[in-house]
């Protein structure tokens, strides 16, 4: 094998709308909503996924423990603040999920009562 040989990489064609997910580039107003660039910023829906939020929370707790054991209390506090943020988000998502389950059970039971009333 000749390890001294340089690799030649093919350049990729430049994309005009790199990382842009909306349809048109020229239009800044879509359906009457102003688009300032940050409104469509989406973190791959990671903050809406209960599992990924829990995983991030555990990761920052572990990083805080590691920083504390290495003798860096400032970094440990920073990581704990991040973990606290994810804990609040986790609790919010759990309460939303519980509310939607309760709403579904309520709507199912009310529809069951309506069908019983119709059949009587």
Image (spheres, grey):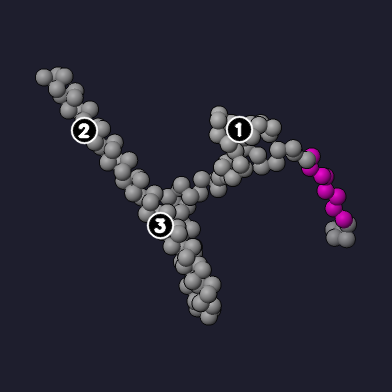
Q: Residue at x 74, y 37 (%)?
A: 16
Q: Quadrant of the C terminus?
A: top left
Residue 34: x and y in percent read 58, 36
- Residue underneath mark 3: 88
- The first of marks 1 and 2 along the sequence is 1
- 39 within the magenta span: no
* Residue 62 in sight here: no
Label 3 sits on a secondary structure element that is helix
Q: Are the residues flagged by discs 1 and 2 in contact, CB closer than 8 Å? A: no
Magenta span: 6-13
* Residue 13 in sight here: yes
Q: Which residue is drawn at 56% across and 42% down?
A: 39
Categorize mark 2 by other alpha carbons within 10 Å: few (<14), some (14-19), many (20+): few
Residue 1: x and y in percent read 85, 58
- The first of marks 3 and 2 along the sequence is 3
Please state which of the two labelled residues, at mark 1 or mark 2, is closer to the viewer.
Answer: 1
Compared with residue 39, is residue 57 higher up or lower down, i.e. above or below?
below
Q: What's the CA distance linking mark 1 and mark 2?
A: 44 Å
The residue positioned farthest toward the top in the image shown: 119
Q: What's the CA distance linking mark 3 and mark 2?
A: 32 Å
- Residue underneath mark 1: 29
Categorize mark 1 by other alpha carbons within 10 Å: few (<14), some (14-19), many (20+): few
Question: Is 22 in front, or is 5?
Answer: 22
Q: What's the CA distance linking mark 1 and mark 3?
A: 33 Å
Compared with residue 79, is residue 86 higher up or lower down, i.e. above or below?
above
Q: Is the magenta stretch mostly helix, strand or loop?
A: loop
Q: Which residue is drawn at 21% across and 33% down?
A: 109
- Residue underneath mark 2: 109
Label 2 sits on a secondary structure element that is helix
């Amino acid at each position: 094998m000749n390890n001294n040989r340089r690799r030649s990489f093919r350049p990729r064609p430049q994309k005009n709308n790199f990382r842009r997910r909306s349809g048109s580039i020229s239009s800044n107003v879509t359906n009457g909503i102003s688009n300032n660039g940050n409104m469509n910023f989406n973190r791959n829906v990671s903050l809406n996924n209960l599992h990924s939020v829990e995983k991030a929370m555990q990761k920052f707790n572990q990083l805080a423990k590691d920083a504390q054991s290495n003798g860096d209390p400032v970094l440990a506090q920073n990581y704990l603040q991040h973990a606290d943020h994810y804990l609040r988000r986790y609790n919010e998502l759990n309460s939303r999920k519980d509310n939607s389950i309760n709403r579904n059970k309520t709507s199912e039971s009310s529809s069951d009562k309506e069908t019983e009333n119709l059949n009587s």
